[in-house]
């Protein structure tokens, strides 16, 4: 029970990092300008590195010989446990920046808490990743402020991005059995506390950007149970194409 | 086993010949990523990755194995150590000098104590030492660098970010 929850929790961390990285990889060589191109590629690389560490650990916990690649390339859509927010399409630049700010504001708090958890492997990875995500969040928040407090056009478009993505944020803070067991058994994150902190941090960025916090209305959920939006299947089909078409292909 | 009669110092000396593939003026000991060498039944080299996704990690591990094999040591194991996480504070003084000569502004000391990520105060140009410099991009050709320019000698340069 305890071990199953640990494995499930670590896989979720890996899935969030990998699926977000894959979304960002779609933008490589398609960014509006060179500086952001570099930022995007560097950030994607950080997430891929984190996913690899989480998957490698998951494989060891499971003990059935699955490698990081097996988790990434040989699982179906409903076996992925990433948040719905992560898999949403990139949209325009404002959509991408908003998604990253909303998620990284959560992920940073989650990693800070995980760095103090009682599972030493998770704590080590979290401590490493935390430094990277802090850098991402600072950069992307500055963009959100520039877009919000920019022209009338950019302000209106990025407000729409926030309004559209808001419904996917509820899931981040809705604990299920895995979260509860992980919190109780491994001194894991308290999602209630993280939610309060997240709201305060995000509200501060949104205020600085002269934008409006959306009302909390209906929230989508299902990612943690493997019930995804239609977008994930297409992403995975592309990501896994090579391994599916040529099983066992290697460099 | 072929590890008999090899000293730790000897191994460290050999490891100081292994270059970082992305910044080839630095050795892995300059970078401070060699965290331990244990010689028991087998030789174990402990390395710490710089960034989670650093593509050089595997290359460096293979270079360590190759370098030791060149000196007749077979069956080396590499252990990745994540904790405590690598910080630019571990780059040696010699490493900092080499970086500057190579044209990369070395990171400031004290990354772990101060939130240096949140301010780029006084990054000196590696060519003319002027402090009149400006950020061009917080990103560069590798995850560990940012792009700067010198407003006095007008040369662009890279800065090794503090983490």
Image: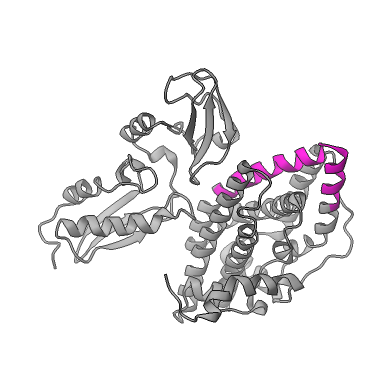
Queried whether the magenta region covers residue B102, the answer comes back as: no
Image coords of residue A58 (percent x, y): 51, 72
Side of B148 relative to B76 (left or right): right
Q: Is residue A115 visible?
A: no
How many numbered markers are drawn?
Answer: 0
Side of A221 relative to A140 (left or right): right
Image coords of residue A57 (percent x, y): 48, 68
Q: Is residue A243 above or below residue A197?
A: below
Tell me, what colour scheme is on the image? one colour
Residue toward you, B71 or A237 = A237
Q: Residue furthest left?
A: B5
Residue toward you, B91 or B61 = B61
- Dividing the picture into quadrants, the one containing residue A17 is bottom right
Residue at the (51%, 76%) spot, across then down:
A70
Q: Is residue A99 visible?
A: yes
The secondary structure that dominates the magenta segment is helix
Residue at the (58%, 30%) spot, across then down:
B135
Residue toward you, A126 or B72 = B72
Queried whether the magenta region covers residue A134, the answer comes back as: yes
Q: Which residues are magenta?
A: A132-160
Image coords of residue A135 (percent x, y): 59, 44
Residue at the (14%, 68%) spot, across then down:
B1
């Amino acid at each position: 029970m305890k071990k199953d929850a640990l494995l499930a929790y670590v896989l979720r961390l890996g899935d969030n990092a990998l699926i977000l990285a894959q979304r960002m990889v779609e933008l490589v060589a398609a960014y509006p300008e060179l500086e952001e191109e570099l930022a995007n590629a560097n950030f994607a690389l950080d997430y891929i590195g984190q996913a690899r560490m989480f998957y490698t650990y998951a494989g060891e916990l499971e003990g059935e010989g699955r490698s990081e690649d097996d988790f990434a390339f040989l699982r179906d859509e409903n076996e992925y446990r990433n948040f719905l927010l992560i898999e949403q399409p990139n949209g325009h630049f404002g959509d991408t920046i908003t998604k990253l700010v909303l998620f990284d504001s959560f992920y940073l708090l989650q990693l800070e808490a995980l760095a103090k958890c009682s599972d030493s492997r998770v704590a080590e990875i979290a401590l490493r990743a935390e430094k990277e995500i802090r850098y991402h969040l600072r950069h992307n928040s500055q963009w959100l402020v520039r877009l919000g407090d920019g022209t009338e056009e950019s302000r209106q478009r990025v407000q729409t991005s926030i309004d559209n993505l808001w419904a996917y944020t509820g899931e981040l803070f809705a604990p299920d059995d895995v979260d509860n067991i992980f919190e109780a058994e491994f001194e894991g994150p308290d999602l209630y506390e993280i939610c309060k902190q997240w709201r305060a941090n995000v509200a501060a960025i949104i205020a600085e950007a002269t934008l409006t916090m959306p009302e909390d209305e209906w929230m989508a959920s299902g990612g943690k149970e493997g019930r995804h939006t239609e977008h994930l299947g297409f992403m995975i089909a592309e990501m896994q194409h090579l391994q599916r078409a040529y099983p066992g292909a290697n460099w | 086993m072929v590890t008999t009669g090899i000293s730790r110092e000897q191994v460290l000396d050999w490891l100081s010949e292994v270059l970082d593939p992305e910044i080839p003026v630095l050795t892995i000991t300059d970078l401070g990523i060699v965290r331990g060498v244990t010689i028991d039944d087998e030789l174990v080299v402990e390395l710490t990755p710089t960034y989670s996704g650093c593509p050089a990690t595997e290359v460096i591990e293979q270079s360590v194995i190759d370098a030791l094999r060149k000196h007749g040591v077979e069956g080396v194991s590499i252990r990745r150590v994540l904790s405590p996480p690598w910080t630019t504070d571990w780059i040696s003084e010699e490493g900092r000098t080499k970086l500057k000569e190579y044209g990369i502004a070395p990171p400031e000391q004290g990354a772990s104590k101060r939130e240096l990520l949140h301010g780029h105060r006084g990054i000196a140009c590696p060519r003319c030492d002027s402090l009149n410099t400006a950020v061009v991009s917080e990103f560069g050709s590798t995850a560990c660098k940012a792009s700067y320019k010198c407003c006095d000698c007008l040369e662009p340069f890279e800065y090794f970010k503090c983490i």
